[in-house]
Image (cartoon, coloured by chain):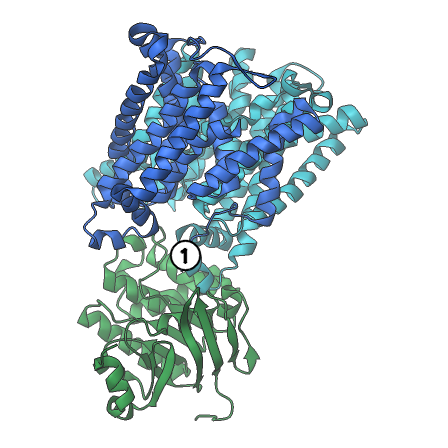
Chain colours: A green, B cyan, C blue
Amino acid sequence: MNNQSHPLLDIKNLVKDFGGLRALNNVSLRIQEGEIRGLIGPNGSGKTTMINLITGSYKIDHGSIYFSGERMDGLQPNVIASRGIMRTFQISRVFKDMTVLENMVVPALCQGQSMVEAKVRAEELLEFSLLTRLKNEPAKNLSGGQSMLLQIVRGFMKKDLRLYLMDEPFSGVHESIKGIIIKNIKAMNQEKGITFLIVSHEMTTIRNLCYRISVLHKGELISQGTMEEVANDPLVIDAYLGGE
Amino acid sequence: MLKHRLNYFGLLLLLLSAIVLPFYLPDYWIHSLTITFYYVIMAATWNLLGGYTGQFSLSHHTFALIGSYTSALLITKAGIPMWTGMVSSWIFNAFLSMLLGILCLRMQGIYLALTTWAFAEIVKTYIRMDFEFTGGDRGLKTPLFFKTMNPLPYYYLFLVFAVLTIIVIAIIMRSRIGYYLRTIRNDEVAAQAMGVNTVRWKVFVFMVASVFASIAGTLYGHFTGLISPVSGEFYEMALIIIFVVIGGMRSQAGPVIGAISIRFLAEVLKKWPEIRMVLLASAVILIMRFFNGGLMEFLRRGYQRIQQRKGRGPVSVFQKME
Amino acid sequence: MGVLYCLMSLGVNFIYGIMKVINWAVGEFFMIGAYVQYLLIVNFLGARYWYVGLFIVAFCTFFLGAFVQKILIKPMFVGIIEEKTEYATIVTIAMAILFRNLAILIGGPYIYTPPDYAPPTRIGPLPLSGNNFIAFIGTIVILAFFFYFLKKTWIGKAFQAVSQNRTGVLTAGIDVLKFDMIAFGIGSALAGVGGALLAPVLLVYPLCGVIPTVRGFEIIVIGGLGSIPGVFVAGLSLGIAESLGAAFINPSFIDIYGFGLLMFILLIKPYGLFGKPERSV
């Protein structure tokens, strides 16, 4: 299944500074196709920054990012998206004045699918996620959890989706919705081979979903491995529990 | 389906009455309606740019101004024939709006408003200052399109163009481009993350809106026979915004209704221009504060109430217009 | 001359810094200030005590500004209104139109001439209008006061804090909403005093706020939105650019030079000399 020498996402020596603050310090990471990778770390460790760099929202200061063998840093976010990468935001960013269905359709339209095709697929996905009854609701009327679910399911609209970056998809979300999200991730991973990188603080869920986990702390990658390995790593324990 | 048919039938009826109307009206009113159609075009296109896409431009009227002056100057000073002058003016405006659009790409709300405001002031001031070339405050005489002062042919010209504009905007908004534009307004960052090429579409909508404005402007210039930098005053821009807000931002019919009804009100209250503006400005403030959707929202809620009394109704007629 | 309009720009920039809202009606507060000053001088104070009028004007416009803020702007921040910048822009533009027309309704479309604040004087060989001189000095004094207030007093520092981090200051116990109101009041008062100060120079009529608004915004674009020092630098540069242009190129084009400078600055620094872009992700 895994091709060790050709990772899907290859991040090399990533450095990002914000003025005097170094958010990411020489971080290298590789994700294989078909993985569900967890990304954890205390607050402020640089997880969101990393996602923003991969998706092109921020510019890299040093280092490089390769996706499926092609260099990607420096490209516009929408170009990166067209290569097969979707993401969700920590605070759900749905299109508030558009209906749920209209929200869904956007990623598909961007890659040239017809409106009809897109709507059919959208309804399928909404059905799978039990959101069908809300399909004509303006997105601003959704609850926090429903909004996050919409954000996530919207990303699946992208045909040929290969990598999905999720930033805290479970935070503040009701258990039942969390279940639907997990169901979606597992289904998409198994049926379509979609790779996931999930940032989260919810250890139990991460343990359930992810085989391998990477740990960031103060902008550096301090540990990587299975949940057991990482949980027992003294560096990690120190990062979470230790003082400044 | 029936609702659909009713809808189109209603619009057709409206169109027919607009076509037939001038035969029952004195010249003064025909003239006034023609100017109203001009404002309908300006309001609808600004709504496209500022309402739907969220690009709050304060220089929309400026493109109408540039359109009219470019065309007039080319024709009168360079001796170019009418149509060539007009089309050249439109091409020039397309280019200019593309530049301005690109300049404003990185700007959000406030900066965009400020920059377009500055652009508007610069152009207006230039026209006033360079009076040897442009006629300055005294205005510039323009050749008439139909070589007659009779407003009737102009009425139909503007009517056709207004209808065309509305149709084009409707087509755009119903297409995938419409989706892209709306996402840009809602959340540009998320739009990009979903794959929307926000750069391309922002420049696109800027150009489309501005070119239509410039066409409206050239037609206006060759209709009234006299253009002046007064059309580039901030007041004109505020008026357009008033039309759109009161009629209902982000609806297809809103700007049209707003422009028509307020122009009508303006005619009725002609003797008291200040009271008129006080009322309108207050209306805008109240609408923004309490009742965001303007007249269209008002009508829609009323319609929904009626529907509810009758029992569950399908999608309302007015919603269809959106 | 550019310096005179700094008060307007300061008003707008200050409000923007605190609330991230541009008050397009600032010129109308200027105009109101001018009218009130005129009324005060003509009816109560007499020409000699014009400076008393300034204080009263400041007071009045402050309260008017705060009142407006409370009714119209505050809802933006209390979560009722969604599209904030759009709302603020439209509402302040509408206010500007409203006030202008109210002024015509109430006072008539006439131009009022307040009495001179000071007789014409001379500086060296150059004759100088007493009013201009007073306006200039007055502006400098007020700017100085404002600067001192901002940098040295506790409240001033609190305002600086709010402009840098709206949510952060909440933890420091600052009632941000109340500060908003006060800031709007101060910004409006600055414009109002500007109007009162410049009344004998620009004269008092309903649209007397228009030109200062244009100049004021020119200064803001050049200096950068939200930047207080930018206002000073830009105001000076504007004044210099206008004088130079009028002297060396062509006096009748005088309005253009300011804009020329503006375009030039925008091309090299799109956010103005000291402006900062906003972070959106």
Q: How crowded is mark 1: few (under 14 residues within 10 Å), some or many (20 or more)?
A: few
**Residue B67 to residue C151: above or below:** above
Total numbered circles: 1
Nearest the eye: B308 or B76 = B76
Vertical relation: A175 (above or below) C53: below
- The secondary element bearing badge 1 is classed as loop
Residue for badge 1: C280
Q: Which of C248 and B294 is in front in this view?
A: C248
Image position, residue C224 (x, y; %): 48, 44
Where residue B110 sits: x, y (%)?
A: 44, 43
Q: Position of residue C122 (x, y in %)?
A: 55, 15
Q: Quadrant of the C terminus of chain A?
A: bottom left
> Which residue lies most toward the right here?
B79
- Give amino acid for label 1: Ser
- Residue sitting at 47 percent across and 93 percent down? A4
Identify the residue at image location x=52%, y=29%. Answer: C2
Residue C71 placement, left or right of A166: left
- Please report, as a chain letter, where disc 1 is located: C
Q: In this view, does B201 lie to the left or right of A139?
A: right
Front residue of A42/B35: it is A42
- Quarter-of-image position of residue B38: top right
| Quadrant of the image containing the N terminus of chain A | bottom left
Question: Residue C171 falls in which quadrant of the image?
Answer: bottom left
Q: Is residue C87 visible?
A: no
Which residue occupies the foreground of this view, B52 or B299?
B52
Q: Which residue is pictured at 55% across the width and 40% down the height?
A: B209
C181 relative to B98, above or below: above
In this orientation, does residue A41 appear? yes
Residue C214 in the image, given as x and y percentages of width and height: 50, 29
